[in-house]
Image (cartoon, rainbow, N blue to C red):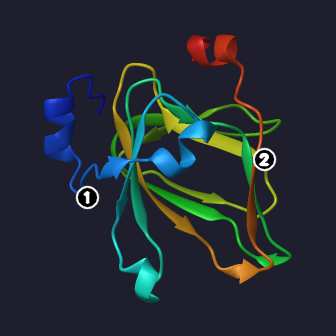
Amino acid sequence: MKYSSKAEFDKANMFGTGQPNDGYAQYFIGDSFLNPLTDFKNGQFPLFNVTFEPGCHNNWHIHNADKGGGQILICTAGEGWYQEEGKAPQELKEGTVVVIPPNVKHWHGAKKDSWFSHISLEVPGENTSNKWLEPIDKAFYEKL
């Protein structure tokens, strides 16, 4: 369901918006918010609810790993997009689960007319790292 109203979105966003995602803002077009769902600083498995304002999306990026690794997105509220390099964009809606293999260039974020949130889970692996790359093409995004 699309949510252009922040108040209506907040009612559906059961895991909470959290705080501005300032630590990664340089890799996002628009404002995103991060809400930790676990006590990851004390050893619990890291789970985050990531919220995107309408039009917000991240840059192309890769979750590198020698073994294991990758990312899982569990879409919880609103509507968004996910795209792997060389493939067509995939529409994201509440209940969509995306399993992103390691070492795959991709991006994800909100549709231009809807708030969006997903739970982000980085899959454990060996020698994991994230590589942030260029922004997606603005004209391409605007046509979605």
Left or right side of 60 for 48: left
Question: Which residue is situated farthest in the bottom direction here?
Answer: 43
Give residue 12's position: percent from left, percent from top.
19, 45
At x 29% / y 53%, what residue is drawn? Answer: 18
Number of numbered discs visible in the structure rendering: 2
Q: Earlier in the sequence, mark 1 or mark 2?
A: 1
Question: Which residue is situated farthest in the front direction here?
Answer: 22
Which residue corresponds to mark 1? 15
Q: Is residue 71 above or below residue 13?
A: below
Can you say which quadrant of the picture contains the N terminus?
A: top left
Visible in this render: residue 92? yes
Quote the CA–CA distance across marks 1 and 2.
Answer: 27 Å
Can you say which quadrant of the picture contains the C terminus?
A: top right
SS at circle 1: loop
Q: Amino acid at mark 2?
A: Lys
Q: Residue 105, labelled with which disc?
A: 2
Q: Residue 84, labelled with which disc?
A: none
Give residue 97's position: percent from left, percent from top.
49, 56
Left or right side of 77 for 137: right
- Residue 37 image-quadrant placement: bottom left
